[in-house]
Amino acid sequence: MRKERIILAIVLAAGMLFSCGKENPNFKDFRPGGEGSTNTRADNERTVSPETRWVHILYSAGFNSLYADLQADIQDFAQGEIPNSSRNADVLLVISRLTKDLKRDYATPNSPVLIRLTREEGQETLMDTLKVWEADKAAASASFMREALQYVKDNFPAAGYGMVFSSHATGWLPSRYYSDPGQFDRSENESAMWSMGKRVFSAMPPIPEYDYPAVKSVGQDQGNPYSEIEIQDLPGAFPMHMNYLVFDACLMGCIEVAYELRNVCDMIAFSQTEVLSDGFDYTSMTSRLLEHNIQGICSDYFEFYNARTGQARSATISLVNCKALDNLADVCATLFAKYRDGLNAVVPGAVQGYFRYGRHYFYDLLDILLHSGINAEEAATLKNAIDASLLYKAATPRFIDFDIYMYSGYSMFLPAACPRADYLNNYYRTSISWNTRTGLLP
């Protein structure tokens, strides 16, 4: 309604101007090419000033069990440093879909909204709702994400764009696989473990909800229909190039995720492990965003959790330079081909993992190849390629209930951990760009 009134006022004012002009014999038409104009260029020849501002988007896909945490994150976001509404100032936007209340009412859909945050000097933060979509639009879908980001692109032209994505996530895994792998692969009803180099099996445990600190486990919309974004569909959700992507979500710190998104953005920040439900420090995040300091967001996140004690001292984070990923892929492709037998013989229990509840799909990239038998020179080449692709990395000594003794900055799938998971292996073989490029799983 506000926008309609503003437009109406402009139209009326314009009408009054031209009416007065016709009645006043001294009126000169100062429009381009008019009798009073010194500019003879047509409208489409006018010089357009280059954009200098960046647009920063918090994409909060919280129509799920994280509703309360994501709502608190938005409130913290609004308490940080907020730009004014001037034309050249950076823009802070929130695209959010949450449940209506804390009762987890997933049967009643709620509308996604686009909100702009501004704060004029001496005033409170204004959270202005710019658009409301239909209630059945799932935030955790590539089609809606593209629709929402296209709206942002069309209405907020900018020199740079970036997005913080906050929701559940399960790395490169296909939709629903993490929560119930047994429905796809019967073998995954059993949890593989290794003792003294021998593989043994036990029933895969369910994922408990309250026995440990809560975690944020790409996207999830509960309700009917249930929705998650497949990792291979995620690049198509971005209608513009992104300067950065920050994933405040679990298990996204995979080389598979980074490689899938390498042409979409310049930098990716993500965690190899789960993320505690408190997530990133949203109060300080806005000042870092306005400085265009994504590494600062990563270091703030790590320092926040590293200063805690007990199980709450749990965090992994890395910041990827996407331009260096092709070189890393070249190095890995050579090693995968040369050490095929060694990869197949790796004992997963001896390799640094980043998972819990028997979800054995995320192991340390460097440690996998060290256990595959690469020599010292090859290990140095690999480590240099990994380090060249990372702008920042950090990890606490433990994550909730397991030690982190090796940390390269990437997790990766270890096929030797899931030899009988036919569905998963076929998905990885045919759908994951990292595998297409490197041949990890032939």
Image: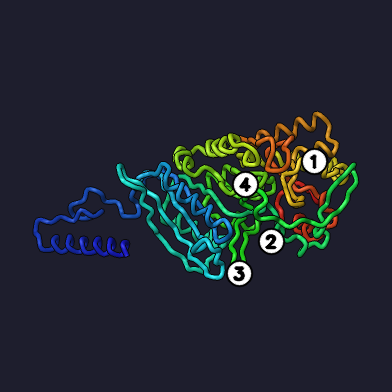
Vertical order, 421 against 248 (above or below): below
Q: Is residue 389 left or right of residue 78?
A: right
Report helix, strand or loop for mark 2. Answer: loop
Kindly identify which numbered label has been placed on residue 32. Answer: none
The residue where tag 1 is placed is: 351
Residue at 65 percent of width and 58 percent of height:
230
Image x and y of residue 109, in percent: 52, 68
Tag of residue 225? 3
* Quadrant of the image occupied by residue 335: top right
Q: CA distance from mark 4 to mark 2?
A: 18 Å
Query: Which of the two discs, 4 and 3, sits closer to the camera?
Result: 4
Viewer-side residue, 232 vs 124? 124
| Amino acid on which the number 3 mark rests in the picture | Pro
Q: Give the mark nearer the N terminus: 4 vs 2.
A: 2
Give the alpha-carbon distance from disc 1 to disc 2, as whole Å. 26 Å
| Badge nearest the viewer, 4 or 1 | 4
Give the spatial CA distance, label 4 vs label 1.
21 Å
Judged from the image, the secondary structure of the residue bearing numbered disc 3 is: loop
Above-or-below relation of 311 to 209: above
For label 2, the crowd category at 10 Å Cα-Cα, with few meaning under 14, some 14 to 19 and many 20 or more, is some
Relative side of 109 to 196, left or right: left
Q: Earlier in the sequence, mark 1 or mark 3?
A: 3
Residue 68 versus residue 295: which sits nearer the camera?
Answer: 68
Pointer 4 and pointer 1: residues touching (CB < 8 Å)?
Answer: no
- Residue tagged 4: 275
User: Residues under labels 3 and 2: Cα distance?
Assistant: 13 Å
Amino acid type at image mark 1: Val
In the rendered image, the quadrant that contains the N terminus is bottom left
Left or right: 25 with respect to 113? left
Q: Which residue is mark 2?
A: 176
Q: Secondary structure at mark 1?
A: loop
